[in-house]
Image (cartoon, rainbow, N blue to C red):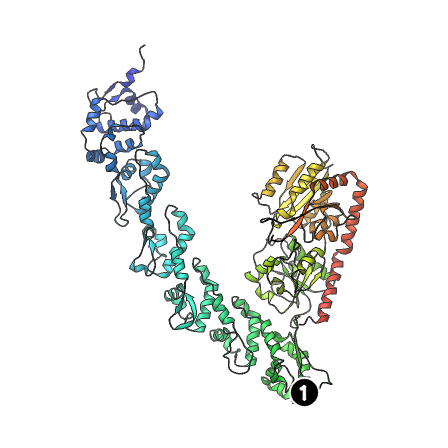
Amino acid sequence: MTSNTEWLKDCRHPSSGEPFSLPDAIYFLIKFRADLAHFRYKSIKDRMVLYFWWNSVGKVNYPDFEWILRPLDVAYVRQLDTNTLITEYQECIAHWLRGTSPDVLEEGPLVQVLLESESFVEASSLEFPRFLDLIIRNRPDLHQYLTLDQFPGQLASLDWWEKHGQFEYPKVAWSPASIYASLNHLEKRESYGAMCFPRFLPLILDSRPDLKINLDLSTLPGQLAAVTWWEKHGRKEYANLAWSTAQISNFLNQLDNIEGLLEQRFPRFLPLIIEHRPDLQKDLDLKTAQGQLAAVGWWEKHGKTEFPTLRWSTSSIVEHFDELDETLAGNLMKVPRFVAPLINSRPDLQASIDIATFAGQVNCLQWWQDSGMLEYPYLRWTTSSALEQLQGLSGSLSNRLTGLPQFLLWLRDSRPDLQAAFDISANEGRRHLVRWWQDSGRNEYRVLSRLSVSAPSEDVSHEEELCSVSISHLSRARPVGVNIIGFPQGVLGLGEDARTAARALATAAIPSVLVNAPMIGPPKLDMSINHLLSEELKHNVSLFCLPPPEMVRLALEGGRKIIESDTYKIGAWPWELPQWPSAFGKVHTFVDELWAQSKFVQTALGRQGETPVHHMPMSVEIPAPVAAVRPRFGLPEGEFLFYLMFDGNSWLTRKNPVAGVRAFQEAFANGQSGVGLVIKAMNIRDDDPIWREVAEIAAKDNRIRLISERLSRQDSIDFMACCDAYISLHRSEGFGRVIAEAMAIGQPVVVTNFSGNVDFCDANTSFLVDGELVPLRPGDYLFHEGQYWCDPDVSAAARQLVRVVDDAKERERIAAAGKLRIQTDYSIEAVGRAYAKRLTEIHSEGATR
């Protein structure tokens, strides 16, 4: 049978006697395809290029045609030496390298010669194989952005080869590992000083004007800037290069003795930075206490931010400066070592503060309380420790001649008017001096106002007559009232705790202000209490509406001044687990007493064993529903709607929404109509596995609806009022505010019979669900060690849901009883009375120690 396509193989262009004469098929293609039109069929070079193009690319597109070399074609190639091929037939080689089948060029040493290295950029002195340059030059798509005559182009070429080239050109087995190793090699240059930097770094800087201006490797600031740039940006921008900066950081972070200074050790980087920073040299003389203190201050305020890759724990030097200075002349109160150098560095303080006199020390203490501790948060002197020192001095033998406290003697000695007014050689004069202090002096010396002096009774003999000194927790310098510290503008439970506390105090005519805790917190979205906001503590009692972990954050992030203020401090601390974690350390000593919102929390907080705990219920106050219509929230009419409501920031493992969903499906199986479940959530993470499980179940049951938008306070209450019954199969609650609010609306609640909510949830006021007490596992909740909670029985919960729907009379009775319980015991007025009673006790006790 004669083939009708054989003519396509005829090599007739330009003639059959020419080497690499084109077959008719190829000749057709160069006329047909625009991308091949530039080939000249009369040029031997172009014909050779077409052959190698065909062998690597063309035959893939046209598999039914085969171009076989003739003997005269092979003979022509064999008479070309390797150097001629590389210099004059580069495009042929570039195509040949892409092929996968054996070919005529493989007969000689061509591949070995192409793998030989040559240098392209004198500055980098890197050597690349010859084939790489050959490929790039003969690939227009590569040549426009890859080049071996500039360092950036060299890096780009290496990256292209690893990602693409080695797969596109299988005839060449080459790895750039040796080049990368050369670039990553650490070099030591005279201009680097004691540092070593990778070979690639100066090459990058020379090619990057945006970096070179700031990253001068001959100066320490430039070197540190280079380290910072690499850690923040460089290692991502140059992912194929490797540099561990730990060696430099470790070297610089090591503590060394400063020449001529034996007492303190500083990190190596500090004197180097100072040497290169004229703006620091004047104040940061490390050979003086004043300069050391300034160095600590600069590092804490600015240095650690400017040089994030460096590490210096200033705790040892701070501890040194916080120690009481025993070298002060005279018989005065001892002040920390930092005080003298700090005052010497502050002309604005020198005129009013002379620590060689007691009056100057009092001025110093007052300045420290008002602003100093805020300006120098890394120093740990407290006014309380100074008052305790003065209290301790009052029992010394030196006071037995007069029986007066030492601080009162020092004050009298510093004031001629007091010396003239009070003759302390007489018993009457001494008593009058004490009376002056209690009535007037404490108001004049605000920082000492918590020192209370009691004179002995009239019938005590002179030899035994010694005044007693106590320290009041209540400040006389502030008016009576309560500072409420927390997140009062946050749309979350903690925010509502603070706001309702203010409203409860108002019902008892107790003044209060709301103070935003000075640390990162929730968005400030609730503006209803803006008229009560204050940036300062205005009253003599402070109420912290924050959980224990947030109190620790407050102490670390900017609230130390509040914690150490001269106010009586109360912790209204929500907590959700039965044990007091050992990780909380001494956080309970931040406050003078604790208020527990439930008996469950009272027991947990009481386990710390030191700070007294009082049961103080939270008020439950809701705005009246104004638009409780279901279509507004996309909810169906005519169905009995249960709902779950929770905040994703409150740990879904504790809120346990999956149990509520499964209880609903078990109670109303087989798609039973007439009932629905609405899940209202906020602050949800889509990657949370518990939320994903809830969403997956809801997607398969059209009776279950999800609402995840953030609602205002009024909208939230309107949404709740649209529904018929609330479900909370929580594992543990500190109080259960949403449960209480649902009861306040007059709704039945199906709830776990465990933790804080059982104060107001019993068989008469709610539909209780029992369960098994189980230990927490790692990841269940913060501070899980030694904790347990209740895993409610889903089947028992399902039976309660059925009971709610089927027994309307019982449902209405329990809902009414629940509403009455909340109104009676948790109304804003009831809680206001409880607050007033305890605050009156605090003031009548004098809150002294």
750 or 743: nearer the viewer: 750
**Quick check: 83 left or right of 791?**
left
Residue 35 lies, in percent from the top left, at 32, 29
Q: Nearer the viewer, residue 513 or 450?
A: 450
Picture coordinates of residue 406, whole percent (x, y):
61, 82
**Quadrant in the rendering for residue 657:** top right
Of the residues shown, which amino acid type is indicated by label 1? Glu
Q: Position of residue 457 (x, y in %)?
A: 72, 83
Q: Residue at x 60, y 57 (%)?
A: 549
Question: Picture quarter containing residue 37?
Answer: top left
**Residue 100 seen from this side:** yes
Q: As displayed, is residue 629 above or below residue 276?
A: above
Q: Which residue is mark 1?
A: 463
| Quadrant of the snapshot with the N terminus | top left
The reply, left or right, for residue 247 in relation to residue 538 is: left
Q: Secondary structure at mark 1?
A: helix
